[in-house]
Image (tube, grey):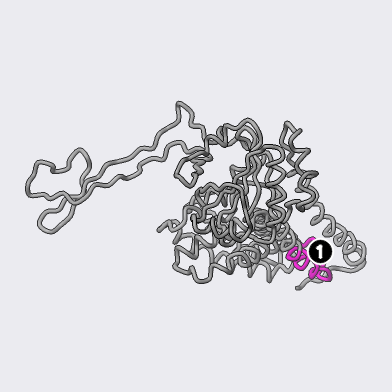
Amino acid sequence: MKGKTLFVKILAECCRVLLGVVFIFSGFVKLIDPMGGAIKIIDYLASFGLQSIQDLSVPFSFCLAALEFTLGVCMLLGVYRRYTTFLVLVFMIMFTPLTLYLALFNPVSDCGCFGDALVISNWETFFKNVVLLAASIVTLKFNRRLFACYTYRVYWFVPLFAYLYALGFGYYNYAHLPLIDFRPFKKGADIPELMAVPDDAEADEYEYLFVYEKDGKQQTFSIDDYPADDPEWTFVESKLRLLKKGFTPKVEAFNLYTGFGEDIGEILLSDTGFVFMLIAPKLETANGDVVDEINGIYEFTLKNQIPFWGITGSSSDEIENWRDFTGAEYPFLMGDEILLKTMIRSNPGLVILKNGTIFDKIHYNDFPAEEDAEDRFTPILTESNVKNQEDGWLVTNLLTFTVPLLFVWLYDFFRNRRRRKPLATE
């Protein structure tokens, strides 16, 4: 009997740790890039014909990521075990059928459950959710046997602090730039290198199919058996089916077009000096409150003979509207909106290139004031290496979250756990 009890205890604890770690990781990477989560939600809404509520994508991205993170923390620390395990089970019951639908019909390429940090296929997502669903059933059934790091008297602090921290952390990444950039266009990325295809790279493999009709019925043939010489069959159409995906570079294209349709993307990448690119995926929704700051940056580039380009996915009419509104004198290039959103999570945002490498990226909230542009950008011209502070910022934020929890645990341990027997029920 003791052996069975021990087995159930170990199984329940393993499920608790698994769910806690997965939920924390999933919520954390979404909070690092809440705008990326909103873009994925827009893809979902579009696939289900719900474009009318796309304006809710950003707040929903925040709430979903914060909820996942908070449930993960509560699960891992054994806080409100009965309620936490129930909510996690509800969460999995909701999303497991959804991921099955995605796997069967593939309306979006990937679910986005781990953001851009870990991209997995829709079938892999479904099987992952099946495992988590089973684990959530186990934890709910045996929730009283789960280890609790805190006593019941301080439970309230953990979910409240975790949720508020999640919202604050997510907002910081939304109002500036993600502390960790999981996309190809991170600081220090060599774009030409990311676009390179090795000589021995595998090519895509396709199968040619032909559709013919006879007696009102259509039939599909391969290239080896299609009835080309049979007059009873009438050709309808040909198809090309992908059998095996070959090598795909991290950056498939970097096409930027002038108003005359000339692609000068490679010219910008081959420039050995600095190139300033003001990127606005959609000018019609770009923040117009930073016009003076943009003009100050442009004046700095003129003074130092640095190329400055506005780059957008909007139409020529929108470019003219922007010029009328801002008095912009800098030239514009047009690029794919998805490419520009991938490059920087800011509309507009500044990307600084040097010899095809991303030297710096700046959110519009961090644009220097017009009179401070000289002081902000002059030191950059003398730098030879990219400065990346991702690791330092990440450690600081992790300490900001874990230290308060540690202090509350110490208080709880000496104030409650050592003085009296912990409550047996929740």
**Residue drawn at (30%, 44%) of the image:** 240
Compared with 1, 339 (above or below) is above
Name the magenta segment's main secondary structure.
helix
Residue 43 inside the magenta-drawn segment = no
Q: In the rendered structure, which amino acid carries the disc numbered 1?
A: Tyr
Task: Tell me how many marks there are.
Answer: 1
* Image side of residue 132 versus residue 222, left or right: right
Q: Secondary structure at mark 1?
A: loop
Tell me if mark 1 has few (under 14), some (14-19) or many (20+) residues whose alpha carbon lies within 10 angstroms of its own.
many
Q: Residue 386's image quarter?
A: top right
In this rendering, does residue 163 appear at all?
Answer: yes
Front-lying residue, 66 or 51: 51
Residue 152 inside the magenta-drawn segment = yes
Q: Residue furthest left?
A: 231
Compared with 197, 209 (above or below) is below
Q: Quadrant of the C terminus?
A: bottom right
Residue 352 picture location, percent across and down: 66, 41
In this rendering, does residue 6 appear at all?
Answer: no
Q: Residue 169's image quarter?
A: bottom right
Residue 188 picture location, percent across and down: 66, 37
Compared with 335, 307 (above or below) is above
Q: Which residues are magenta?
A: 148-164
Compared with 164, 335 (above or below) is above
* Image side of residue 190 versus residue 399, left or right: left
Residue 133 picture location, percent across and down: 56, 61
Front-lying residue, 22 or 163: 163
Q: Which residue is mark 1?
A: 150
Q: Residue furthest top?
A: 199
**Residue drawn at (52%, 35%) of the image:** 266
